[in-house]
Amino acid sequence: MKKAITNSQELADAIAELELREKIQKREIEETFSVVSENLKPMNLVRNGFRSIFTGEHKGDLMNALLGLGSGFLSRKLILGKTNGFVGRTVGKAIQWGMAGLVSKNAEKIKETAGGLIDRLFKKHGHDSNDGHAPNQAFNRKHLRGPNNTDGRNVNM
């Protein structure tokens, strides 16, 4: 709550305080304007745009969009092949953009599923004890037995 001014000295002090506050605010506005005008230069806009795209924060979004666009293009080519007519091109573009949108929205689920499938395809028998399956004993005996060893260990490794 502001106190009431009762004499000329308090009035002069209040004016001096307001003038000082005005100078500080003017300096802050000028600094802010300088920073904003520097950031709005076309070269800085482009530079900052590329930085923001390739930082870790937006890197996943960029990868999801690229994955979506690539899969859309691939699905259009696989489904329709090369089309010359107007209807074929229109349907092809609709398929491409529909698949691109679908894939980019569900990219994380697709990556997880694909990663799981790849892991299952290339999993080595007997090396992963976390899967709950017993290692293939016939495989181990056949491939690990060395020429000088009868218990299954290869001493020449």
Image: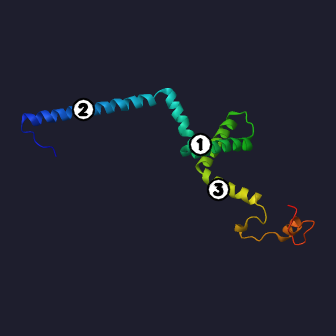
SS assignment at label 1: helix
In this picture the colour scheme is rainbow
Three-letter amino acid code at disc 1? Leu
Residue at 6% across / 39% down in the picture?
6
Nearest the eye: 66 or 34: 34
Disc 3 packing (10 Å; few <14; some 14–19; many ≥20) = few
Spatial separation of the CA atoms under disc 1 and disc 2 = 46 Å
The image quarter containing residue 144 is bottom right
Which one is earlier in the sequence, the residue at label 1 or at label 2? 2
Judge the density around disc 1: few (<14), some (14-19), many (≥20) Cα neighbours within 10 Å. some
Q: Residue at x 19, y 35 (%)?
A: 17
- The amino acid pointed to by label 3 is Glu
Q: Is 30 above or below relative to 140? A: above
Quadrant of the image containing the C terminus? bottom right
The residue that appears at 73% across and 36% down in the rendered structure is 83
Q: Amino acid at mark 2?
A: Glu
Label 1, on which residue?
Answer: 62
Residue 77 percent across, percent down from the top left: 73, 41
Q: Is residue 107 left or right of residue 150?
A: left
Q: Which residue is mark 2?
A: 22
Give the number of marks. Answer: 3
| Left or right, residue 105 beside residue 123 | left
Q: Nearer the viewer, mark 3 or mark 2?
A: 2
In this view of the protein, which residue sits in the foreground, 68 or 10?
10
Disc 2 packing (10 Å; few <14; some 14–19; many ≥20): few
Q: Which residue is mark 3?
A: 112
Q: Is residue 147 above or below residue 33?
A: below
In the rendering, at what x and y percent does residue 46 appear? 53, 31
**Rendered image quadrant of residue 115:** bottom right
Q: Is residue 56 above or below residue 116?
A: above
